[in-house]
Amino acid sequence: MKKFFAIIAALVCALSLTACDLFGERGGNGDKDIVDERFCTVTFVTNCEQQLEPYYECYKGDPIALYELRRDGEDYTFDGWYEFADFSGTKYTQSYTPTKDVTLYAKFLKHTFPLEKMSAEEATCDFPGHTEYYVCTYCYETFADADAKMPSSEENFTIPATENHPYSEEFSHNGVAHRRYATCARDYLYVDLGLHDTLGKDGSCSVCGGTTAGVTPNLKYELNAQKTAYVVTGMDGECNTDTLRIPAEHEGLPVERIAYSAFKESTDNIGLNRITAVVLPSSITEIGDYAFESVGGRGDFIFEGTMEQWCGVKFGNQTPYGTHTLFVGGKEVSGDIVVPDSTTKISYQFVGVDGIKSLTFGKNLKTVNKFVSYTVPKINYTGTIGDWLDINFGLNANPLDEDNELYIDGKLVTEITVPNGLSKIKQYAFEKYNKLTKVNLSGKVTEIGYYAFAWCKNLASVSGFQNVETVEHSAFYLCEKLSNIDDASSLLKVNRSAFFGCGEIGEAENGIIYLGKCAVSKERNFNGKTVSFRADTVGLAEELFNGSSIEEVTLPGKVRYMGSSVFENCVELEKVTFEVGVRKIGYRAFMNCSSLKTLELGEIENIGGAAFYGCSSLAEFTLPTTCIEIESEAFNNCNALEKVHYIGTEELWARVQVGTSNDSLKSAILYEPPQG
């Protein structure tokens, strides 16, 4: 399989399991948890060597957007998403509305898209040319020949411009800073840096009289739904200016928004690569996804309002501009940046800005979707540690990084004590913060979010762990020095890679590493064929033995939680026994255990989705009458399955909830005991 990448804009969330009562009133030791039926998890399988993370925990019945996948350099096209691994049923391409935990499978087809011939163009003074080449109309891969046998990068076809002499010069007029641009083929363009709010009718500065770029002609506008303001949707025809200037008003109404992909090169928007500066009025309150995709990455980005107004601008899910020089309120944004106290949510305001030395922000900032795209040496936070832990950080949005420093109340943070009022450490709270050495959870925390302390390479000790029940995936990923976690007696749910790469945590027995009564991982050199769990084991971490060469396993009766994919891909596993007391088999627990022949289910009540998917040697087993639910694809692709002995009546079997893609199970049901 060649290199694979996904064009996916919103798949940036991670798997979160609902804290639910796994076994109902009959759960181990009579324990009962609270069921939250509002949520479900969507998992994506790409039908490739690489698999996307389960990315979305959402409300049942709420539609989610779906995105197209590509295989870089491979002759395939993306067909769509399907609910079943055999790609039967409905195809979904734009959106999907989940009503329960579900897996969507990506289907690819060998594509037959034509190549587009790019005729040779001579280089000019201002623009580079290129030799003849060919582009795939689907994946945009470039080739030197019409038969697509000679892949090559576009740079190989480029002919540099002949006499292009662009330059940028800053100058002063009556003490007021301006900047001018010129090329060998164009007149000078003087760009007001925002110190003057008004331009004269002739495009001159109303204060000093200097010539400025003026409002860009040919802009396209649409009224918003309320008909109270205008949205800039792009350009009508070719761009003939070096400076893209958006007006504050159009036909008597304010201009408030830049639309999705408004200035992305297209048949309607031509020549955008000429633009070397973007000027936005203070009236702009929203910038859509990819709004300046063909403009960003060069020159100036100028916002004529205040820093408070800039921090209040709402951005889409993609950075609207590339690396550039940012001006706000007439001043270049660099060095020490202070986010106004009134700011409650921030996203792409400072992404791509060079030369940031420090960021200062306070307790009113509650949501951070994106901050910067590289290390900031110093973070000053004016709130408390409790306020910091209350921030909702998005993927790669936490400004902390391995080489920077966090100061709270003016003190460098190397140890933290969680306030008594907090019961959950939110996702990404201290991801990649290498200055952190010690964490005290104060004994009140019950859940630690995904990536909360991932890559904290100097974190050595976590205390106050006694009430923690759930550790989300990658929470302590690659905390290399972590060797002391005290009293994990309440620990039950450990998700994928939660303690991957940590030091010697917990205690080992029979090659299994435990934290309290939860089996969290196996020893690196584990090579046992028979797995023996401690009798008091209550939880099994996700992917605990995924891909191992074990041959036989018995699950103790006190197991209350089984993470997904615990024994997935154990292709040598032949026998599985569930002791009486185990109520639920986890999602994909024994998926692709192709040698599994003997299955003893004890008093199982629930068999999770795809639990025995692909167990191609399983021909016969007995299903207990305690079973009340078999989720989708639990026995899909069990091609050898012929006999399932169900001792109950046909009426009782009719009450069992059986999910889709379990046809091989249904056809094998026998209302009789096994022979012998």
Image (tube, grey):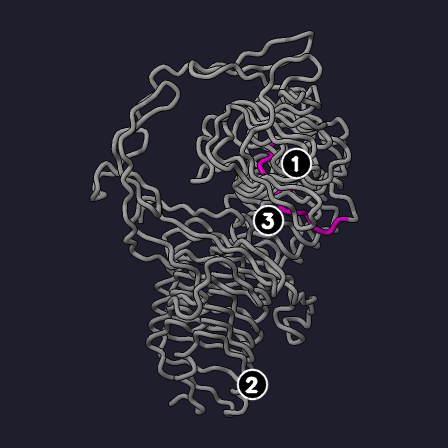
Residue 45 occupies which quadrant of the picture? bottom left
The residue positioned 50% from the left and 31% from the top of the image is 295
Going from N to C along the chain, the mark reached first, 1 or 3, is: 1
Left or right: 672 as drawn, with respect to 233? left
Specify the amino acid type for callout 1.
Answer: His
Residue placed most toward the observer, 505 or 159: 159
Segment colored magenta: 422-434
The residue where tag 3 is placed is 450
Specify the amino acid type for callout 3.
Answer: Tyr
**Foreground mark, 1 or 2?**
1
Disc 1: CA contacts within 10 A as few (<14), some (14-19) or many (>=20) = some
The residue where tag 2 is placed is 655
Give x and y (percent) for residue 499.
54, 48
Specify the amino acid type for callout 2.
Answer: Arg
Spatial separation of the CA atoms under disc 3 and disc 2: 37 Å
**Foreground mark, 1 or 3?**
1
Left or right: 443 as drawn, with respect to 146? right
Left or right: 621 as drawn, with respect to 129? right
Going from N to C along the chain, the mark reached first, 3 or 2, is: 3
Q: Quadrant of the C terminus?
A: bottom left
Residue placed most toward the observer, 478 or 93: 93
Give x and y (percent) for residue 156.
28, 29
Give x and y (percent) for residue 166.
45, 16
Q: Secondary structure at mark 2?
A: loop
The residue positioned 38% from the left and 49% from the top of the image is 70
Going from N to C along the chain, the mark reached first, 1 or 2, is: 1
Q: Secondary structure at mark 3?
A: loop
Disc 3: CA contacts within 10 A as few (<14), some (14-19) or many (>=20) = many
